[in-house]
Image (tube, grey):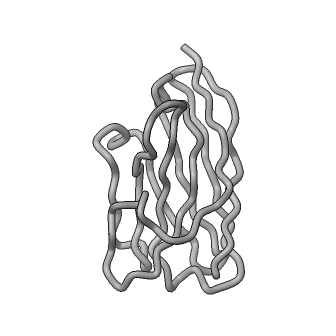
């Protein structure tokens, strides 16, 4: 089982930036599609971004497209989510997920492995 641990969350003013990191351990991360989802209070979990095994394929939800960038380092077993021009509606707990499927699935909320999540708060 792949273990995942997020870091880099916190509080920021609207228009600011944060970079989330996800450290993978226990298995070789290069065998997994990786992604980020988020959940705000009272709302369902939302797929935010995903990246395929080699990094060639990426996916972004319409709500973050053009502002967020997902990347990975298969040597360091790390996945990143660079978040720019943050908005108050981006406030949520962000989760790093891993998917062993042979296909690149963009439904991150259905991935099998999850980290504990990390809080991101954007104030107006």
Count of marks, rendered view: 0
Q: Position of residue 99 (x, y in %)?
A: 46, 74
Where is residue 69 shown, x and y percent of the image? 44, 51
Name the residue at 50% across, 71% down: 112
What residue is rendered at 61% in x and 46% in y?
Answer: 19
Residue 45's spot in the image, x, y percent?
A: 45, 46
Q: Is residue 79 above or below residue 33?
A: above
Residue displayed at 64% across by 75% down:
77
Using the rendered view, name the quadrant where residue 96 is placed. Answer: bottom right
Residue furthest out toward the front: 42
- The residue at 71%/51% (across/down) is 7
Please tell me which residue lies in front, 75 or 122: 122
Residue 25 image point, x, y percent: 71, 77
Seen from the viewer's position, the closer of residues 76 and 106 is 106
In the displayed image of the protein, which residue is found farthest to the top?
Answer: 124
The part of the image, by quadrant, that contains residue 3 is bottom right
In this image, 37 relative to 4: left or right? left
Name the one closer to the observer, 113 or 75: 113
Query: Does 103 appear above or below 36?
Result: below
Q: Which quadrant is the C terminus positioned in? A: top right
Q: Quadrant of the N terminus?
A: bottom right
Q: In the image as oriented, which residue stretches furthest toward the left?
A: 62
Q: Relative to 71, does residue 47 appear above or below in the rendering? A: above
């Amino acid at each position: 089982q792949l273990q995942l641990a997020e870091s880099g969350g916190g509080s920021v003013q609207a228009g600011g930036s944060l970079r989330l990191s996800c450290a993978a351990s226990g298995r070789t991360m290069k065998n997994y599609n990786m992604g980020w989802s988020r959940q705000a209070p009272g709302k369902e979990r939302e797929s935010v971004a995903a990246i395929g095994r080699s990094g060639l394929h990426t996916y972004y939800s319409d709500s973050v497209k053009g502002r967020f960038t997902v990347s990975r380092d298969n040597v360091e077993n790390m996945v990143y989510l660079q978040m720019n021009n943050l908005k108050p509606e981006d406030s949520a707990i962000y989760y790093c997920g891993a998917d062993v499927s042979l296909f690149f699935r963009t439904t991150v909320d259905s991935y099998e492995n999850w980290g504990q999540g990390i809080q991101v708060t954007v104030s107006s």
